[in-house]
């Protein structure tokens, strides 16, 4: 069913501004979206999925440690 979705009909916003307080010391140094799962960050996984469906316009809301996210 997901392959039938045309993402160009949607306005995609990725919320990447969280501090990750529940991640303990790791959350103080890294935004939640940069947490790695099997060598890929959560943000990389989201972007890869959007690319798979050929979506090109993605907007990000960044906050805490935004420079790390933008890098």
Image (tube, rainbow, N blue to C red):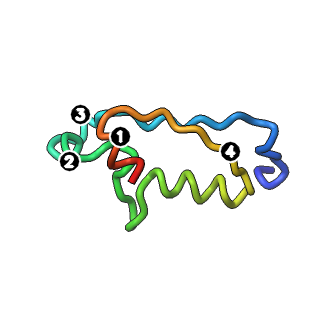
Residue at image x 23%, y 42%?
A: 27
Marks 3/4: CA–CA distance: 30 Å
Question: What residue is pinned by disc 4?
Answer: 57
Marks 2/3: CA–CA distance: 9 Å
Marks 2/1: CA–CA distance: 16 Å
Marks 4/2: CA–CA distance: 30 Å
Marks 4/1: CA–CA distance: 19 Å
Q: Earlier in the sequence, mark 2 or mark 1?
A: 2
Residue at image x 39%, y 59%?
A: 37
Q: Is residue 39 above or below residue 60?
A: below
Marks 3/1: CA–CA distance: 16 Å
Residue at image x 66%, y 58%?
A: 51
| Numbered label attached to residue 23 | none
Question: What residue is pinned by disc 1?
Answer: 66
| Numbered label attached to residue 26 | 2
Question: Residue 61: horizontal and vertical position, in percent?
Answer: 48, 33
Q: Earlier in the sequence, mark 4 or mark 2?
A: 2
Q: Residue furthest bottom?
A: 39
Name the quadrant containing residue 65.
top left
For the residue labelled by badge 2, is the local secondary structure a helix, a strand or a loop? helix
Name the quadrant containing residue 48.
bottom right
Question: Residue 67: horizontal and vertical position, in percent?
Answer: 34, 45
- How packed mark 4 is, by other alpha carbons closer than 10 Å (few <14, some 14-19, many 20 or more), is few
Left or right of 3 on screen, residue 47? left
For the residue labelled by badge 1, is the local secondary structure a helix, a strand or a loop? helix
| Numbered label attached to residue 21 | 3
Q: Is residue 51 above or below residue 39?
A: above
Q: Is residue 67 above or below residue 41?
A: above
């Amino acid at each position: 069913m997901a392959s039938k979705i045309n993402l160009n009909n949607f306005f995609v916003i990725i919320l990447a501004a969280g501090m990750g307080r529940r991640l303990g010391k790791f959350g103080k140094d890294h935004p939640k979206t940069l947490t790695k799962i099997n060598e890929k960050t959560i943000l990389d996984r989201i972007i890869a999925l959007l690319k798979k469906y050929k979506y090109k316009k993605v907007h990000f809301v960044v906050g805490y440690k935004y420079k790390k996210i933008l890098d």
